[in-house]
Amino acid sequence: MSNQQVTLTQFIIEQQRGLPDASGTFTLLLNNIVTACKQISHRVNCGALIGVLGSAESENVQGEVQKKLDIITNDIMVKALDWSGSLGGMASEEINDPIKIPKQYPKGKYLVLFDPLDGSSNIDINMTVGTIFSILRCREGIEPETEDFLRRGTEQVCAGFVLYGPSTMLVLTTGNGVNGFTLDQDVGEFILTHCNMKIPEDSSEFAINMSNQRFWEPPVKRYIDECVAGEDGPRGKNFNMRWVASLVAEVYRILNRGGVFLYPHDLRDPSKPGKLRLMYEANPMAFIIEQAGGLCSTGRERILDVKPNSIHQRVPLILGSKNEVERIIAYHQQD
Ligand code: AHG
Ligand code: MN
Ligand code: MN
Ligand code: MN
């Protein structure tokens, strides 16, 4: 590791320095999240060698059949965080109710909500997956109720995701821009490699699961039809399409080269206004995307302003390059 490289630990301590309540609790919490993600990265990298692939034959609260790694990664996160004294509680995609801090450990002033393995349908085909986390403050010394978790995305103090891809990367915001760190596997440290990431305001690349087209609302149909119409259509330019089925991979691509991602409201099931979950997918990604100069909306409302009504609430999710998301919002307003 050359001497001019900045480690995540140095970066965070320098960012926290001078903050009024820089007690080190946040730095400890983030360190523990990062340690858990390094452990997850190792399990994901080993894959079939250690028998962690395939289905767990169990169903989670989402009605999804869990992968073995959905459960393994959830347990790694809980065990890495519950002892630290920095948390009042946790919430996970894989667990129905909020996760209590065991009685033998002190409670702290933060809540962590996480998707321990995002894109897990890709794990058996060796495609990029990730971990997404969101950090809120909570009232100290109390047993948090569900209500304590149901805070608007604007109240997040930190959001991040780790990408288990060709390289393992951490993307992080604490409200002062977005920075990317690459894991130096030999040293075991995340090194600052992508400073102050910014999303291009324009793009010619969209990401959507086209197989759901018959369920989309008119504004989304109009936007995608115009993209597909290319240079002969109203947009006057050709578009490219991507669909990785891992939100973390889609967001990282958009942070790097722009684009727009849509998992819109679909008319299939009125009780499910979209697939992605507000508290541990849409909100952390919205914080990151906005901090990088992009926009993140349901099509009718800024994601970060959505008032949550349940931990596993789903929302329509449209995010990415500012001018493309603004166009999609305008189509919803004209509808
Ligand atoms: P998870 O694996 O945490 O359940 O999330 C999967 C999500 C998201 O990562 C991805 O963008 C989307 O599901 C893909 O949905 P489809 O499989 O319907 O394409
Ligand atoms: Mn899932
Ligand atoms: Mn997910
Ligand atoms: Mn998941």
Image (spheres, grey):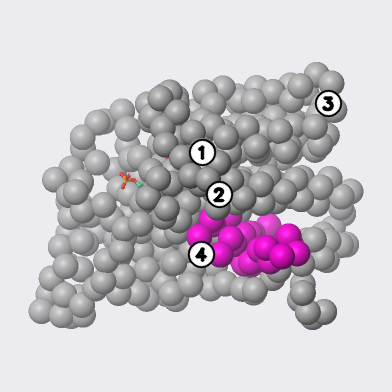
Q: Name the residue type under label 1.
A: Val
Residue pointed to by mark 3: 105
Q: Quadrant of residue 185?
A: bottom right
Q: Is residue 205 placed above or below 26 in the rendered structure? A: below
Label total for image: 4
Which of the two labelled residues, at mark 2 and mark 4, occupies the earlier sequence position?
2
Q: Would residue 179 be counted in the magenta stretch?
A: yes
Work out whether residue 238 or residue 154 is closer to the camera in this orientation and state it: 238
Which of the two labelled residues, at mark 2 and mark 3, occupies the earlier sequence position?
2
Work out whether residue 84 or residue 186 is closer to the camera in this orientation and state it: 186
Real-space Cα separation, disc 3 to disc 4, in angstroms: 37 Å
Q: Quadrant of residue 170?
A: bottom right
Work out whether residue 184 or residue 59 is closer to the camera in this orientation and state it: 184
Residue stretch rendered in magenta on the structure: 162-190
Res 297 visible: no
Residue pointed to by mark 2: 46
